Image (cartoon, rainbow, N blue to C red):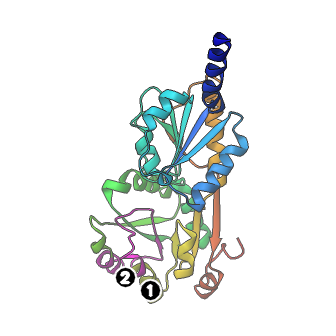
Amino acid sequence: MPLLRVLLLLFFTLIPTLALAYDVLVLQSMHEKGYDEAVRGFKRDCRGSVRRIVLTDFAELDLTRIIREEHPKLIVAVGDRALEVAQRQHGTPVLYMMALNAKPRGAAGVSMLLDPGRYISVFEEMGVERVGVLYDPARSGAYVKRALAAAGRTRVRLVLREVHAPKETPAMLASLKGKVDALWMLPDATAVSPGSTEAYFLFSQAERVPVVTFAEVYLSMGGAVALTIDRYDIGRQVAELAQRMLDGNPTDEGGAPDRRAVTRTNEGVVRQLKLNGVVGR
């Protein structure tokens, strides 16, 4: 009987560990609609078992202990904060998604930055040639270089202005008066900050030029076109990467481009400015 009791004790002690056995730990920065949508896409196509932890649900999270005790085969980080925390771990592969400021350092994932050629195509369809772009070289220099290469194959010409602090944005926009046919808002926290966003739309109204942006929320402020990521499809795309890793196949480091984009328009602004090719998208 004593031996039986010992065996039963060991069995019931192991039950929690067995119950927590899973393949993928999804580490999410916070509860946020876009993050949740990406995770739904991931769960749809990931064949492995998944546990999700949201960082803001915990005052403190001992991820090292969780990894040591639960042995997930892979971490999927959702958002910048989650990626930062995940990359402190060693020995467990990391994938990422929805991380705007991702610096992979050994991780693979899907970038939130759409191929700049997609935006250039929108400008071509709109019939504009001179496009104003404000950017911080430290944040968006590499992306702008790719945008210049894409524009070089078209009639679109990018008129660039560097900003090194958010307070410089209004003055740099003013320097574009009479020199551009459209503005391109980049997801650059220096060039597009809460304090400077209004300046883009005041410029748009005064100069009667459209603003093409990266987030649908700016349409209600006066933007003409928003070309945004498909969050659900990003999750599905990361699930494909995860499945390859779980199957033992290597995955290239760095951020793969998002394969789908969603185009939204402010039809009132589009009609007012008599733009070509974008109404009804």
Check residue 177 in the rendering and tell me which mark sits there, or answer none. Answer: 2
Sequence order check, earlier mark of 2 and 1: 2
**Picture residue at 60% right of the left edge, 88% below the top:** 272
Give the magenta part as a residue range. Answer: 170-198
Q: Where is residue 162 in the image (x, y as percent from the top left)?
A: 30, 65
Does the magenta segment cover residue 196?
yes
**Picture residue at 27% right of the left edge, 67% below the top:** 165
Residue type (three-letter) at the residue carrying disc 2: Lys
Q: Is residue 210 toward the left or the right of residue 102 in the image? A: right
258 to 226, vertically: above or below: above
Q: In which quarter of the image is the N terminus?
A: top right
Quarter holding residue 171: bottom left
107 to 220, vertically: above or below: above
Residue type (three-letter) at the residue carrying disc 1: Glu
Q: Name the residue under label 1.
A: 207
**Picture residue at 38% right of the left edge, 36% below the top:** 88
Does the magenta segment cover residue 234?
no
